[in-house]
Image: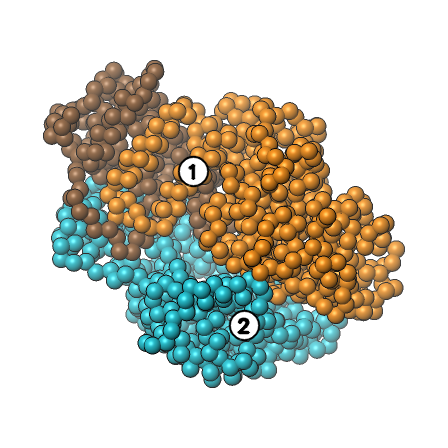
Chain colours: A brown, B orange, C cyan
Amino acid sequence: MSRELFALILLLAPVGCGSDAEPTDPTAPTATPQTPTDPPPTVVPSFAPHVRFKGGAVYANDLARGLELDRDEVCLELGVSDCATEVHKVALGGVDPYDGGVYKPLPEAPVTAPIALDRIAVSACSLRAERDFAAPSSAAFYGALAQGDTSTEARGSVVMALYDRLLLRNPTTAELEAVVGLYDELDGDELPRRWSKLACIAIATTTEAAFY
Amino acid sequence: MPNTTRRLGRRNFLRALGASAAASAAFGLRRRPLAAQPAPDGSPYFLIVLGASGGANLLDSLLARRQSECPATVHAFPDQVVSDIAGTDFRAVDLSFESLGPIPMPFEANQSSFVNKRKDDLMVVTHTGTSVNHAIAQRRAVTGNEAWLGRTLQETVAATYGEGYALPNVYLTEQGFAARGLDDSLPTYAFGETVADPLVWPLALDGRKGIRDAPTADDLQKARALRNDVLDPGSQFEKIFGQAQRLKHWRHQRGAPQAGVEAQGLIDDLILLDEPALLGSYGLTASDDLPALLDKFPDLHTDPFEAQAALAFLLLKNQVSCTVTLAPSLQATINDSQGLDVRNPPIAFDFSHQDHPSAQAFMWRRVMQVADALADLLATVPFGEGSMWDRTLIYFATDFGRTKNKPSGASSFGSGHELNNGSVIMSPLVQGGKVLGGIDDATGFTYGFDRQSGAPVPGTEMSEPDVFAGILQALHVDTAGSGLPDVPAMRRG
Amino acid sequence: MTQPRPTRRRRATGWLALAAGLTVSADAWSIPQATEGLCDVYADTRLCLSGPVSCDTCHLGGPPALNPYGEALHGELPTDAEKDPEVFLSALEDALRATEGYDSDGDGISNLEEIQAGSKPGDAASVPAPPGTCSQEESDVASLPEHGYDTCRTDYAYLLRKVTIDFCGHSPSRADLDAIRTAEDPDGLVDETLKACLDSEHWMGKDGVLWNLANDKIRPIAALKAGDDPGPIPLGDYEDDYALYVYSMIDDHDVREQLTAQFFVKRVDGTQTTYELTNGSPTFFPLTALQTIPREQRVGLLSTRWFLVFFTMFTPIPRTSAAQAYRSYLGFDIAKMEGLQPVNGEPVDYDLKDVQADACAVCHATLDPLSYPFTRYNGLGGGPKYDEDRMDGFTATEGPQIANTPEAGVLLGEPVADLVDWGRVAANSDAFAQNVVRDFWVHLVGDAPTPDEAEAFERLWQDLQVRHTYSVEAMLHDLIRTEAYSVP
């Protein structure tokens, strides 16, 4: 499919349900953009890239806001303890001063850090998808898919919304095509539900989502 | 399980779990066999760095002096509490105390049973350090004062034997014994992975297992591949900031190291939580070894040091790591369920500033118990024609010694930091039953030895590089060309 | 420069020498005045302008082992310089000059160029940063909205995102980002956001950003906590310390109060956490949480109950307390041999700890006079109190000489009469202002100031002292506008 055609399809696609939110709420979603945005061919890299890890707490806050979940339901290990601020707190750049004597964040991310980050995203994205598929009429992201529309347009609209809400920008055409195309790589049952989770996880665990 | 008040970092988690102690039991059977064992020839050796934080003084353990042997101003014990260990150069102290310094808590500290049991694997190496600063001295205890391009013992062992291990070098403490070395030429996998809390850390060993409604492993892999191979490399964010060291490190960690961890299914091998029903409802299981671990470390759910030791064993047994580093916390660990029960005084051995004899006795007991349990456990794990213990070395690393003098005749006194001391090493790989060097009864100071024969040489002192070299050589690490001294007296055979 | 550059081979020989244990003895290359001497010669270089020069400029990790640059200097110094600091200092400049043209670490950049640029001449991994200027073409590209990040100038969307994350604890909304890209007064929007976020729980609440910056300074232990949610051995309530620390950095308060306050601060929980000044103890019951030091002897965070029971404990000469204060509030870690300013005639060794031994005296000639003003503040064993005659109580265990320990000491080369004086001198020092700004710089930028950022860093801490009258919030409004923070 050509990029132009893809963009045209998106223009005709339904808008994500997130646009129903109160416009006066500064954290509420705005209307989901409908066209990808491609960068110029040349890039001027940062001269002094002072990139920081968001840390577990901020990351989970952003995920909650982006996926319209309550913060305390984003990820609970064994159903009892917050992944970001309790169980994986130190691995994700936090401290444990009173009990563990960890006064400062670890100087480098341990191997478990990206795994723990994935767990948070897997939990939140799975919850979002399960909730939307259980109640398509009030779904935040996946209403169309839950109601059986697995068209490229429907998936493209979801990807646009996920980029808008999780990365605060439009996807590029290449990103849009890649995430939409993931659907075609899946075999077996419940493809819409599975793709919904995976699209969210892939975007929510990019370095762009975890660092700033 | 006692209703302890030791607050773990994730205390809500554990409170919610209400973890209960399991009955002692023999080893459970593994659900699946260990990976194929490498042949003994060329197969790894294992290093446990057991940090005796704060200054473990040899005059309070294997080199104890009797009052009849020393001037009244040199630290020594009543003659009757010091025993000679038959067939060795060692001594042991068995004492009862009414309090741990200012803490009104009676306790007994019996060393003789441990030393008698382990005498054939115990060795004392006398030496004199170069710093009385905790952080620096701890670092030098594992770098031999930067003896080999600034690399640490653990990094050297991991570089030698750790290729193919998921996490070759694991630090269960954040103290100076877990310092990063300076030799960046070592392979990346040689540098340590820090574990902040052994009880909950294993939950971060798999990206999806234990999460309800999570995608399958295959599906998750597809999402990750999309992210790693398409989305990230193509993103403007990565093009702008991709050269940042933090991003490079992150991308590295979520590559082969992460795959190695997840591929082994470690999340089920290493979980120490004792809540089978709850774990089961999330598709998880505790380590099969938990009953045996609770037998050796009954307080592992409340005592961070025991939790470290339990996880250290599992990391070695499951061939996740070839070197682990643990140390008693500098924080107080207190169980007040049945009166005041201090498991760990604040600042560990350094509590000797407050009261030297009781602090040393208490802490020596603590590290000896953990070392003994680890050796027992490793001896049950077949490896080649023997056991893992046959190929393991426990290095009681410490910062420095303590001042040797005391107010004349005093039985309770505080001590300062002292460069002169020595190290205890426990391993079938070393010259068991030996004190390399000696001690001057008139001053309490240790002196050196001949590196070849181990014969004591009064008037000389060994240094940090000697201990560093001797440990590596006992572990069959090739030190040729390193410039390190050859210390055959420290190794067996 | 015609002087030969050491080849890789020579460098390898140096490493082998180190590995063979052929380095000089511990007491030799532990000359505390070395970094000062270096900066006497290179005062205006970025190496010296960017803060304390670290030992690894010349040493491998820390003394005594030398890195290749240290070795080069060693080769130019007279042999007796190892033992005599005066000889060392008098010969240092010549040695420095003689090695300026060398490339000791073999990274292709001469030692002098590295010192001028602020990188380390003995570490091949440390090289001057490339000049961060955009060409016109690059500038045009970077400013395109589709480029995503304007890497050639302040990028207000990037800045807003960082400010919102750092100070409010979450990302801004897409609408906020879109708005600032077209705003007429983006600076005003950023200021407005920062002002609002400085009052957020994420920033100033319990366990918030400011609170956590104090962890390493306060070193809490739950088992020893008194007051609310006490541990099993309640000795003091460190939350009083956190409250004072946070208070000193909000609402245009004077951050020097960390070391000069003769009041306490009570945290009041609620939807919005607030901090209230109180002249009495924030808590009167239980007694284990009671602040007992009389007002005229209070020295901010250096005389709280927690500081005294935890750091001083029973110790006659509380070196741990002094070292902790020196590290936490002035940025000098004596463990790393930073901030060594030996005092003539010291250490005296009033407590007979053999601190006059060569390996000890290197640090104790600074540390002991630094510690004397802490000696009149009791910790455990009688409880926290100020006691002029405290040292008399130690004669039975430490010997009669302990009573001669003076209360007066020396801090940063300046005599101080007592701990109140210590706090005043420390709080007014450049080191304190640098340390305050460095804490925030490292937290917000993510790394310590680079040589290229040294000038901005210097301006910030100097402005904190004068233009901002020690208001952290005012300083932060400037910090977020530095190139390091605001330009992607």
Q: Chain of mark 1?
A: B
Disc 1 from disc 2: Cα separation: 42 Å
Q: Is residue B347 visible?
A: no
- Give the image location of residue B273, x and y in percent: 58, 32
Q: Nearer the viewer, residue A187 or C307?
A: A187
Label 1 with label 2: CB-CB less than 8 Å:
no
- Image mark for residue C30: 2
Q: Is residue A45 visible?
A: yes
Q: Residues within 10 Å of mark 1 (few under 14, many from 20)?
A: few
Residue type highlighted by circle 1:
Ala
Q: Nearer the viewer, residue B93 or B371?
A: B371
Quadrant in which the N terminus of chain C is drawn: bottom left
Task: Choose mark 1 or mark 2, whichever is in front.
Answer: 1
**B414 to the left or right of B252:** right
Task: Kindly identify which residue carries mark 1.
Answer: B256
- Image mark for residue C144: none
**Quadrant of residue A174 in the image?**
top left
- Give the image location of residue B426, x and y in percent: 71, 48
Residue type highlighted by circle 2:
Ser
Q: Residue at x 58, y 64 (%)?
A: C20
Give the total of numbered labels.
2
Q: Residue at x 31, y 35 (%)?
A: B229
Q: Residue at x 76, y 56 (%)?
A: B435
Say yes or no: labels 1 and 2 on the same chain. Answer: no
